Every structure is written in C-alpha cells, then in structure tokens.
Image (cartoon, rainbow, N blue to C red):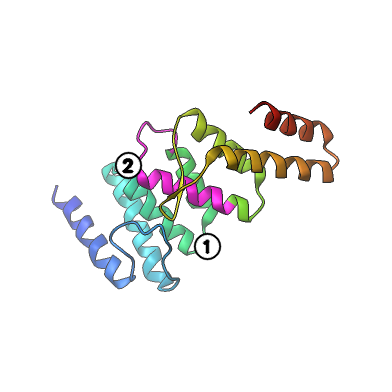
Amino acid sequence: PKSKNSLNHAIALQSKVAKWPIKTNWKGTKPGHFSERNQLADLYKKRRESYGDNSWFNFAQHGLLLINSDQHQTAFSMWEAKFNDATFDKDAANAAGLMLTTYKANQEWDKSVVLTDSLIKKRRFAQYRYKTIDLSATLELSLYEGAKKDMQDRSFANAIVKLGRILNE
C-alpha cells in the first residue's frame, strides 16, 4: 500500500534527522536529539499498530528509542509481551540480554529470575552487545543475590526457596 511505503520513507528520513541508525544497534547509541527520536519512536509504533509490523526489528527499534529517552520500563514491558510470540531472533536475544544486564545493574533479582526461567524453559538465548549470556550462571547469581536480599528483609521462607533452587539446578 502507498501509505505504508510513505510511512517507511518517513521512518528513513526521520532516522537521519534523529541521527538514529537504520539497523538495530545493540552496542548503544549516543544520547541526544530527544524530540526527533521521540517522533521516530512514534513512527515505529504506528507501523506496528496501523500495519501489523510485529517483527522483532520493529519492536527492537521502538524499544531502543524508548530506552534512549529514559523509558526503560515501557520498552521492557513491550518486549516482555513480545517474548511470548513464537518468533525469536537476534533482536529478541539482544533485547533479553539488555533486560538481564539492566536487572543485574539495578539488582532486580526477581525480575532477572523470571526472565531467565522463561528463556531457559523455551530453549532460547540472550545476548548482550552481541555476546551470548550464560543463562544458567545468570539464574544462579540472581537466585543467590535474591536470597541474600530476602534474608536482609527477614523474608526467610523466600530465601530458603531460592537457595533450594540453586542446590537443585
């Protein structure tokens, strides 16, 4: 359709104005051009909502633009819903890796456990900056650190469950 081609053309032009790469860049993009990047994020969202572009590429670009404007939770929520799809590719793996790395940096151990469990159960993988993440080690660390936090919070039953999982994994 002509309007879909127009939208793709608008995305290409807005990417130049926003100084945003046409291909997903999982190594990070410099901050800046806030207004232009928000407009570009809106175009990727429109492409998904109006034309059914549910590709991981489209989700990845939209999410990375949101993250670039400090909307991590919005991006992560969008990606979490997309992980339930049958499709899973390098963009999905890099989205998962970025989420796991962020959870570790923010010490969000329970979120890390949930995502890692899901990836392992579905036999998927995660990458951070194009390098594969060891999901077993990530799960073990998240359970251990989560158990330590639970003990500090005097939530001993939760800590015992997590430590028990480490011993049984």
| Magenta stretch, residue numbers | 83-102
Tell me: 52 left or right of 126: left
**Residue at the spot x=33%, y=45% of the render?**
49
Q: Quadrant of residue 138?
A: top right
Tell me: 5 left or right of 166: left
**Residue at the spot x=38%, y=54% of the render?**
62
Residue projecting furthest to the right: 154
| 99 within the magenta span | yes
Indicate which disc, 2 or 1, sits on the residue closer to the N terminus. 2
Amino acid type assigned to the residue bearing label 2 in the image: Asn
**Residue at the spot x=33%, y=49% of the render?**
58
| 47 within the magenta span | no
Q: Secondary structure at mark 2?
A: loop
* 146, 15: nearer the viewer: 146
- Residue, disc 2: 54
* 57, 152: nearer the viewer: 152
- Residue, disc 1: 70
Residue 84's x, y, as percent? 44, 33
Q: Is residue 87 above or below residue 127?
A: above
Amino acid type assigned to the residue bearing label 1 in the image: Asp
Residue 124's x, y, as percent? 44, 35
Residue density around tag 2, few if under 14, some if 14–19, many if 20 or more, within 10 Å: some
Residue density around tag 1, few if under 14, some if 14–19, many if 20 or more, within 10 Å: few
- The quarter of the image holding the C terminus is top right
Q: Secondary structure at mark 1?
A: loop
